[in-house]
Image (cartoon, grey):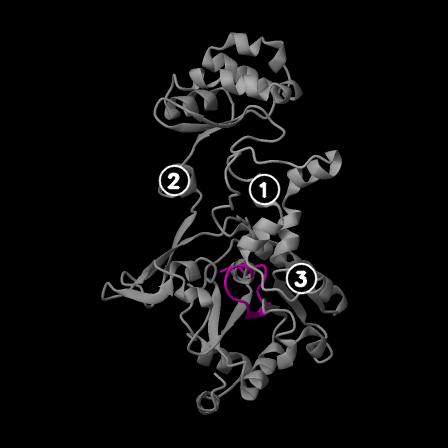
């Protein structure tokens, strides 16, 4: 079996909820040995964020929530009580054997335990220390607790999401958390590259609010260039017309004409030569200017065909078009299935022996991702990790357990 890209990299994972666990799950899929450190008897808060929970062998709910499962595969779970001096001492021994520490405690919390970056960097100069917070390590909001919903609101995305004239709407999943995890994982890889060249570790400061502002992308830059504050456009695009959801005779379809040729070809498929030849719609800037008139003229054509008919006809014409799938239809889509975007991993508590998960979306030709561990049960690997990494005997582990360190 071929080596994975991050074989030999070990991560001390002090994260919970979604942003940090997303980052470490991505790195684990790529081969890093991710040691998920959890509080004895409690664990990651999301273990209790259900229902739904995995059904056990008796058909009843287990303690493993679907939310927890979404971001914690490819990890090993150990329990350490960071509220005890013995637990802190054990944590430092493990940190000394790790390349990366990832944490999402409130600013200053780990420093009070003697586990802050400034306290560890002298003893472990090669350590990469990634801090994931709501608002960052600096600035007037640094000590505030951060949540995805707050970041979406404060970072501007809710102001351009949803239908005009209704209350602001968040994205349907915790996208600020997920994107923060992605930025964190990418930056950790960059820091590893620097460390391997120079021997120098460093602290990474990544937060939800910064990330949310960063992925305003074109709408944010539209504002910076024009000075005009963007507004919600529902399913429309601020810079491209036509680009929205249209009703069909049996449902809805997405039409996304990214250039003038695609718009003209849509007109031909729709049997709308008067729209194709109308000078108001000859170019995208003109269609933007006359957005309302064009969108008022298009629906009568769109309802003449079913969704499947539109998708088939426009695909043949090379005009971007697609259905609005519910999540069940998304997983049933033949392209999603062909790309292997659902996986099933063995799990000791699951009644049918496996849990269904969403696959990692990246495809590497030489070193494909590998799912070595299902999301672990609380403390599942405590004895294994302490014996393997620290060389502790069963009696020594038992003594730490008696002291309440694990």
Q: Is residue 95 placed above or below 282 in the rendered structure?
A: below
Q: Which residue lies under the disc numbered 3? A: 141
Per the rendering, the mark at residue 159 is 1
Q: Which residue is mark 2?
A: 326
- Counting residues from the start of the chain, the first of labels 2 and 1 encountered is 1
Q: Position of residue 167 (x, y in %)?
A: 51, 42
Distance from the alpha carbon under mark 1 to that under mark 3 = 21 Å
Along the line of sight, the residue nearer the viewer: 164 or 183: 164
Q: Give the alpha-carbon distance from disc 3 to disc 2, as whole Å.
A: 38 Å
Q: Would you call the spot at circle 2 few (<14 residues within 10 Å), some (14-19), or many (20 or more)?
A: few
Seen from the viewer's position, the closer of residues 390 and 1 is: 390
Picture quadrant where residue 222 is located = top right
Q: What secondary structure is the magenta-colored segment mainly?
A: loop
Residue 336's disc is none
Q: Hey, which quadrant is residue 283 in on the image? A: top right
The answer for how far apart the CA atoms under marks 2 and 1 are is: 24 Å
């Amino acid at each position: 079996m071929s080596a994975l890209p991050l074989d030999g990299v070990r991560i001390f994972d002090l994260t919970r909820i979604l942003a940090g666990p997303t980052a470490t799950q991505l790195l684990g899929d790529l081969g890093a040995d991710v040691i998920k450190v959890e509080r004895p008897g409690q664990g990651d808060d999301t273990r209790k964020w259900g229902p739904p929970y995995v059904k056990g062998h008796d058909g009843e709910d287990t303690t493993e929530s679907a939310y927890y499962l979404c971001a914690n595969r490819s990890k090993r779970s150990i329990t350490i009580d960071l509220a005890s001096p013995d637990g802190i001492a054990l944590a430092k021994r493990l940190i000394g054997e790790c390349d990366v520490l990832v944490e999402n405690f409130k600013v200053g919390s780990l420093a009070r335990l003697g586990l802050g970056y400034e306290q560890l960097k002298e003893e472990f100069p090669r350590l990469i220390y990634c801090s994931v917070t709501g608002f960052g390590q600096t600035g007037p909001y640094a000590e505030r607790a951060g949540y995805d919903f707050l970041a979406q609101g404060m970072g501007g995305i809710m102001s351009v999401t949803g239908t005009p004239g209704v209350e602001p709407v968040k994205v349907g999943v915790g996208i600020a958390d997920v994107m923060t995890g992605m930025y964190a994982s990418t930056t950790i890889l960059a820091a590893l590259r620097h460390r391997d060249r120079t021997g120098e570790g460093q602290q990474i400061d990544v937060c939800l609010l910064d990330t949310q502002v960063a992925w305003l992308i074109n709408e944010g830059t539209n504002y910076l260039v024009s000075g005009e504050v963007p507004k919600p456009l529902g399913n429309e695009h601020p810079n491209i017309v036509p680009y929205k959801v249209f009703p069909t005779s049996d449902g809805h379809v997405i039409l996304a004409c990214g250039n003038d040729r695609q718009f003209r070809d849509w007109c031909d498929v729709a049997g709308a030569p008067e729209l194709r030849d109308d000078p108001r719609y000859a170019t995208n800037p003109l269609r933007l200017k006359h957005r309302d008139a064009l969108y008022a003229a298009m629906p009568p054509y769109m309802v003449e065909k079913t969704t499947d008919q539109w998708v088939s006809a426009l695909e043949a014409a090379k005009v971007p078009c697609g259905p609005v799938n519910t999540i069940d239809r998304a997983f049933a889509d033949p392209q999603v299935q062909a790309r292997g975007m659902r996986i099933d991993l063995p799990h000791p508590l699951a009644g049918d022996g496996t849990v269904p998960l969403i696959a990692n979306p990246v495809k590497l030709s030489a070193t494909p991702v590998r799912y070595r561990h299902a999301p672990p049960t609380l403390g599942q690997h405590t004895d294994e990790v302490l014996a393997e990494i620290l060389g502790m005997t069963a009696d020594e582990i038992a003594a730490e357990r008696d002291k309440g360190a694990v």
